[in-house]
Image: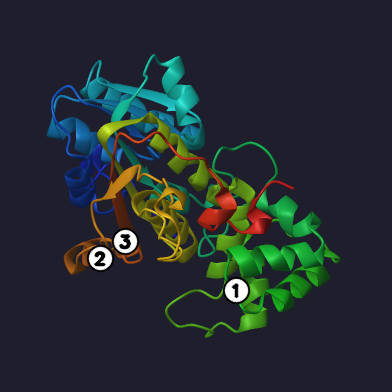
Amino acid sequence: MMAGRGVGLTAAGGPARHIPVMLSEVIEALEPSNGKHFIDGTFGAGGYSRGLLESARCHVLAIDRDPGAVRFAKILESDFPGRLKFVLGRYAEMRDIAQREGIAAVDGVALDLGVSSMQLDEPERGFSFSKDGPLDMRMGGAGPTASDLVNELPERELAAVIGTLGEEKRARSIARAIVARRKEAPIARTAELADIVASVLGRRHDETKHPATRTFQGLRLYLNEELLELARGLSAAEHLLKPKGRLAVVTFHSLEDRIAKRFFAARSTPAPRASRHVPERARSTFSPSFRLLNRRPLSPTKDEIRLNPRARSARLRAGERTDTPPHALDPANLGVPRIALPA
C-alpha cells in the first residue's frame, strides 16, 4: 500500500523523511545519459527526478496530481535550472501534458505507485490509520473525500470496494458495521474508521498489519481511481517512448503489480499459435512493443528494507520499447477490477 518516493536521505534544508524506493535499480533500468528526456509521472518529493538529473545532464518532465509536490519541485528547479519542468496533473494524461510542453517522445518514464511517505506522514491528509485526522485520502485535493464514500455508498457497493480493491475477506461485515455506525453520526475521522474495522476484525487480527490496512487501501484506490490511472498511464508511456526508450514501474501491492505484469506480458510475448494445424497465414501477426528488462520483478535489498521498512512490498518491473506501434488499451484485460472502471 505504501510508497516511499522522496528526496532521499538528505535534502535542502536538512534531513528528509522521504526515501525513494529502489532508486539505484530504477536509475539503472532507465539508463540516463546526457541529452535524454524523461518523464517522472509520480514526482512526489522528487526522489527519482533528482536521481536522474544527478546521473547525467538530462531533462525531466515531472508530473504529480498532489499540490503538496510543488514545494519539492521548486527545490529541484533551482538546483537544476532549465532541466526540470514540473506540471501539476495526472500521469495518465502524460501524452497531453508532454504535447503542451512541446515534447513528442521521451527516452524513459518512471512510475512509483501508491501513496507517498509525505502523504502518510501528514495526518491532515487522511491516509493514515495510525494518526488521527480528517477522513480525506484525496491525492489531488479535489472532489469527494473518503468520508463521503463511507457515509454515502450503499452497503453492497461499500463491501465491494473494500473486498475487491482492499482484498479484505470480511468486507461485508466491515461494510455492515460502517453503515450501522453512520446511522448514529457521520464518520469523519481516520481513527474512528480504524476503530470500526478493528471492532469487526479484532485488534490482533494480523500482528504484521493494522486491521484497517486493507479497508483504507480499498477506499483510497477507489477514491483516486488509481488502478484505472495505472492502466491509462502505462498506455500513455507506450505511446510516448522512443524505440529503445525505457519504462520502469514500482508497485506496492498485488493489484498494482498484476496490472503492470499483464501489461508487460501482453506487449512482450507474441500470441501463441492456437494449433499446429492452423495455416501459417492465419497465425497471429502480433509484434511485441516491449522487450522485458527483467523476467521477474526486482525486490528491495534487505539493507534497503532495514533503512526504509515501507519498501518491503515494492516490486520493480521494467521494459524497453521496440519500434512496433503502440497497442490498443483494454483496462479490463490488464486486470483492472470492474468496480474500478467507469460505470
Q: Position of residue 272 (x, y in %)?
A: 40, 60
| Left or right, 34 with reference to 272 | left
Q: Tell me the CA gap for discs 2 and 1.
A: 25 Å
Quadrant of res 302: bottom left
Q: Amino acid at mark 2?
A: Ile
Near-viewer residue (136 or 93): 93
**Horizontal placement of 328 versus 337: left or right?**
left
| Sequence-wise first label, 3 or 1 | 1
Binning the other alpha carbons within 10 Å of mark 1 as few (below 14), some (14 to 19) or many (20 upward) gives many
Residue assigned mark 2:
305
Marks 3 and 1 sit apart, C-alpha to C-alpha, by 22 Å
Where residue 119 sits: x, y (%)? 46, 48
Tell me the distance, in whole angstroms, between the alpha carbons under discs 3 and 2: 6 Å
Look at the numbered disc 2 and give the secondary structure of its residue.
helix
* Rendered location of residue 117, percent (x, y): 39, 51
N-term-proximal mark, 3 vs 2: 2
Q: Nearer the viewer, residue 278 or 30?
A: 278
User: Which of pointers 2 and 1 indicates the residue nearer the eye?
Assistant: 1
Asked if labels 2 and 3 touch by Cβ distance under 8 angstroms, the answer is yes
Q: Which mark is residue 168?
A: 1
Left or right? Give the position of 64 relative to 316. right
Q: Does 311 appear above or below 207?
A: above
Q: Can you identify the residue that label 3 sits on?
A: 311
In terms of sequence position, does the residue under pointer 2 or pointer 1 come before the other? 1
Q: Is residue 238 visible?
A: yes
Quarter of the view holding residue 13: top left
Percent x, y of residue 193: 66, 65
The label nearer to you, 3 versus 1, is 1
The residue that appears at 44% across and 43% down in the rendered structure is: 234
Q: For the residue labelled by badge 3, is the local secondary structure a helix, a strand or a loop?
A: helix
